[in-house]
Amino acid sequence: MFTCHDVQVEKNGDVFVVRLGKQPALDDLTADTIRDELLGVVERPDCNYLLLDFLGVELLASAMLAKLVGLRRKMESKGQRLRLCGIGSHLRSVFARTKLDRLFDITDTEADALKVVVPQSPPVAETAI
């Protein structure tokens, strides 16, 4: 695990998990810094899946929403996948009002998101001899 200036990044298998809760308010002042840090992760050659965990984030400015849309576009153009999780009820209503809940894949928890992003292999059935 490593920590960038404002975010905590951990590689979990093939997924980069970025926890944004260190900054409870992702406002206009932090949007550019966080975007730059997220782009640094996305530009890594081993980044195919990115999970943004918003657990602990209470305020999300419109500038940050715009940065997330741009990040999604960039990742999609490179064939990478982006998923969001840990979005509380207040932020979820912001995503719903802006219709961004239709644009982003959102799960409740990090564990649920990891199951969807990198599905577990089905159990191998034993064969009778």
Image: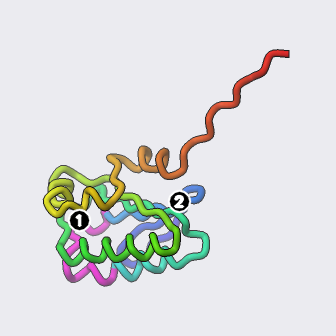
Q: Is residue 121 above or below residue 69?
A: above
Q: Which residues are magenta?
A: 21-33
User: What residue do we see at 47% from left, 63% from top?
Assistant: 81
Question: Is 26 within the magenta?
Answer: yes
Tag nearer the camera, 1 or 2? 2
Dot 2, how many residues are within 10 Å of its Cα: few (below 14), some (14-19), or many (20+)? some
Of the pair 95 and 9, the residue shown nearer to us: 95
Q: Amino acid at mark 2?
A: Val
Question: Would you say 28 lies left or right of 12 here?
Answer: left
Residue 10 seen from this side: no
Circle 2 residue: 15
Q: Is 40 above or below relative to 96? A: below
Q: Position of residue 30 (x, y in %)?
A: 26, 79
As drawn, the label of residue 58 is none
In what element is the residue under mark 1?
A: loop
Q: Which mark is residue 24?
A: 1
Residue at 47% across, 74% down: 77
The colouring scheme, among rainbow, by chain, secondary structure or one colour, is: rainbow
- Determine whether, in the image, residue 42 is placed left or right of residue 53: right
Residue at the location (54% across, 62% down)? 11
Q: Amino acid at mark 1?
A: Pro
Measured as percent of width and height from the top left, residue 112 is found at: 42, 44
Residue 126 x %, y %? 75, 22
Number of residue marks: 2
Alpha-carbon neighbours of circle 1 within 10 Å: few (<14), some, or many (≥20)? some
